[in-house]
Amino acid sequence: DIVMTQSPDSLAVSLGERATIHCKSGQNLLSSFNNKNHLGWYQQKPGQPPKLLINWASAREPGVPDRFSGSGSGTDFTLTISELQAEDVAVYYCQQYDGVPYTFGQGTKLEIK
Amino acid sequence: QVHLQQSGPGLVKPSQTLSLTCAISGDSVSANNIAWNWIRQSPSRGLEWLGRAYFSSRWYTNYAPSVRGRITINPDTSKNQFSLQLNSVTPDDTAVYYCSRAAPGMDAWGQGTTVSVS
């Protein structure tokens, strides 16, 4: 199984400031087949299912605010929220879809400082 | 817009079978390059992918090692839905269960079903 490790486990950021979440994969997620990183970022709010924010490590999903961005390649990835808004309080997860079993990171809880 | 609607009981007795269904609207369970998944979430396990079914000239299924041998995911083309059966459940199977569509990021999710094994 591909182990996904996120850091930090929790994060408190002031409104309007930048939040950065890291995800490290136990295997290279850059596919030689399509030259894409097989990684997604999700946001989960209490009582709701996860919501896909970023596909292919850096492709924002339709309707996702442009303050959310994804970067990285291979085994190291980053989700950045450029100017934190109150509605961004949530738990964020990375997930690899390079191979089954699909695996998720343990989650990063983002709060307002 | 794809919508997934889950149904099934929220309470299952130990050693019995957990059965959930996910009805699809806005897409087809037989669509190419789409996988239909079951995932569960609990405080002890986090988000755990259980398995998937997908159609590519024929039907394929893949299951997580943690539940292989106990799990079956069945697509139903006549009703455009797919189901989860998890046999011989124990209290450790207590979790919120989700269905999802993977294309390949999971861009649509069911509302979640809280299943307690007791």
Image (spheres, coloured by chain):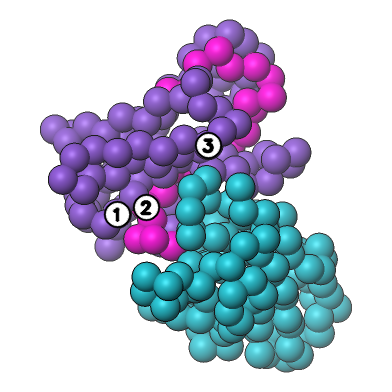
Q: SS for tag 3?
A: loop
Quarter of the image containing the N terminus of chain B? bottom left
The residue located at (55%, 13%) in the rendering is B88
> Do callouts 2 and 1 mark residues in contact (Cβ within 8 Å)?
yes
Which label sits on residue B34?
1
Which tint was used for chain A?
cyan
Left or right of A1 on screen, residue A54: left
* Mark found first going from the N terminus, 2 or 1: 1
The C terminus of chain B lies in quadrant: top right
Three-letter residue code for mark 1: Ile
Are marks 3 and 2 in one subunit? yes
| Distance Cα–Cα, label 2 vs label 1 | 7 Å
Graded by Cα atoms within 10 Å as few (under 14), some (14 to 19) or many (20 or more), the crowding at tag 2 reads: many
Q: Is residue B63 visible?
A: yes
Tell me: A69 left or right of A4: left
Element assignment for label 2: strand
Residue farthest to the front, as pictured:
A32
Query: Which element type, helix, strand or loop, lies under badge 1?
Result: loop
Asked whether the residues under marks 3 and 1 belong to the same chain, the reply is: yes
Pointer 3 residue = B64
Q: Chain of mark 1?
A: B
Q: Which residues are magenta?
A: B85-105
Q: Residues within 10 Å of mark 3 (few under 14, many from 20)?
A: some
Chain B palette colour: purple
Q: Nearer the viewer, mark 3 or mark 2?
A: 3
Instruction: Indicate which label's residue lies in the foreground, 2 or 1.
Output: 1
Distance of label 3 from label 1 (alpha carbons): 18 Å
Whether residue A102 is situated above or below residue B7 in the rendered picture: below
For disc 1, the neighbor class at 10 Å (few under 14, some 14 to 19, many from 20) is many
Q: Which mark is residue B80?
A: none
